Image (cartoon, rainbow, N blue to C red):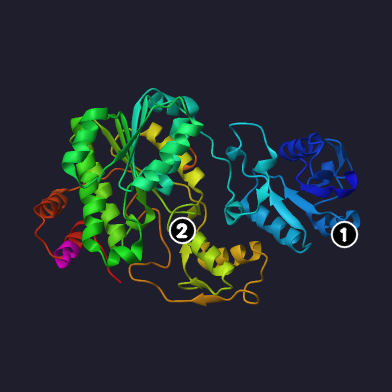
Amino acid sequence: MAGHKKKVLIVGAGVAGGIVAEVLKQRVNGEWVPVAFVDDDPEKQTKVLYGLPVLGNRHCINDIVKKLKIDYIVIAMPSVPGEVIRQIVEICQKTKVQLKILPGIYDLITGKIKISDIRDIEVEDLLGRSTVTLNISEIANYLTDKVVLITGAGGSIGSEICRQIAVFGPKILVLLGHGENSIYEIEQELKKKYPDVPLAAIIADIRDCRRVNQVFNQFRPAVVFHAAAHKHVPLMEKNEEEAVKNNIQGTRILTEAAHLNNTEIFVLISTDKAVNPTSVMGATKRAAEMVIQWMNGLSATKFVAVRFGNVLGSRGSVIPLFKKQIASGGPVTVTHPAMKRYFMTTYEAVHLVIQAGALARGGEIFVLDMGKPIYITDLAKNLIRLSGYEPGKDIAIQYTGVRPGEKYEESLYSDDEQVMPTKHERIFKIAPKKNNFVQLIDMLETIDQCNYSNQELIACLINVVGLKQN
């Protein structure tokens, strides 16, 4: 019955807001009914758009909510900067009504907007940057009807690479990982969503040279995305050998297999922690970048790396930890008030990684535009507010101290690296330098011998990549 319908105020009277209004109005038996817009554009004030009145700008939201007895506010501004979304969220939260959002437009390009697309605000929405545009034809040229292998395919980055590549119709999508459950899960998801894409689910350890070569000989991948890695900074400080074997030796084994099997493009997923590394994890990823550049000089395969910062949806992200801490009443733990990090969403990062593969000429280290670094404390405060609490009042924030291997702030490139533009505005590349790989080769030989101490491994990392320990 009409009397039981929930009144909806839509923030944003543009195309997206209009579509939201139409979708809600078309649902005869739906519980939501749109009643008005707010929009900051002065030319839209007092007009009727998409059958609804525009009653004011963002600063009128509180008065409109009270006057019309609004039940829900839907933010339908998918392309505005995150700072604008943050400001609007702060205004809306003061009304105490339920707040929803329409995700970034790049999340909706595969189909029409559905009611299920209108969801609760997530902290990722507050990062919102300009929409990532892709050169679809360039990407299709190197992925469509090609055998594509993804290592770490069950992980957060690897599985998203699988999802996005499946859209381009690869000849075979080879899902390689060490954890059987995660590989099974992504295989089942892809079978359901992309039934026409042939899949091969492979359980393998990238440090097992014989097994890796067996897989490459069988499938002859044209394109490889290498996402498998040990990434947890404090944990790898205590497990140096495993970080070295997985991140350096595993990368070398994969690159050699790619070379021997005439792979066309090999893309390493790297990290901002590889820049002036202060952690074992960062040092091993910098060494992996060097392996890529070394192999590129020996092979017809185009070996490249893509370097970026923290991904909010990834395993090990602070967001799941903060949510658990908030759910249990706090405190939310942050290592230090000065701690800053670059962040982007998994979807956005993988979009750019795949585009970078299309730009590969061989030997490049690509760097993604991550926007401005964000204080971890601000991230924690935003998440507390989005959960309906007040930071410091309802949920405390506790500082626990900087952990081994951590920096206060990361950088995407070092002072001696020259950053150059590419034809994509969100992707940059490091100008190639003449590298002396003698020390790298000596380290790889030491690792192969399997007769070393952790102290010797650290010494190698200091000599090869300039590891600076805290």
The image quarter containing residue 138 is top left
Magenta residues?
454-459
Decide: few, some or many residues near mark 2? Use Cα within 10 Å; few <14, some 14-19, many ≥20: some
Q: Nearer the viewer, residue 191 or 455?
A: 191
Q: Position of residue 47 (x, y in %)?
A: 88, 40
The quarter of the rendered structure image containing the N terminus is top right
Image point (59%, 49%), residue name? 128
Looking at the rendered structure, which numbered label has been put on residue 66?
1
Q: Amino acid at mark 1?
A: Lys
Q: Is residue 396 above or below residue 274?
A: below
The question of residue 297 being in magenta is answered with no
Check the picture and name the quadrant holding the C terminus. Answer: bottom left
Mark 1 lies on a secondary structure that is helix
Q: Is residue 290 left or right of residue 341?
A: left
Going by the numbered disc 2, the residue's amino acid type is Ser
Distance from the alpha carbon under mark 1 to that under mark 2? 38 Å
Q: Quadrant of residue 381?
A: bottom right
At label 1, counting other C-alpha atoms closer than 10 Å, the crowd grade (few under 14, some 14-19, many 20 or more) is few
Q: Quadrant of residue 423?
A: top left
Residue at position x 22%, y 56% in the image: 244
Residue 158 visible (yes or no): yes
Which residue corresponds to mark 2? 317
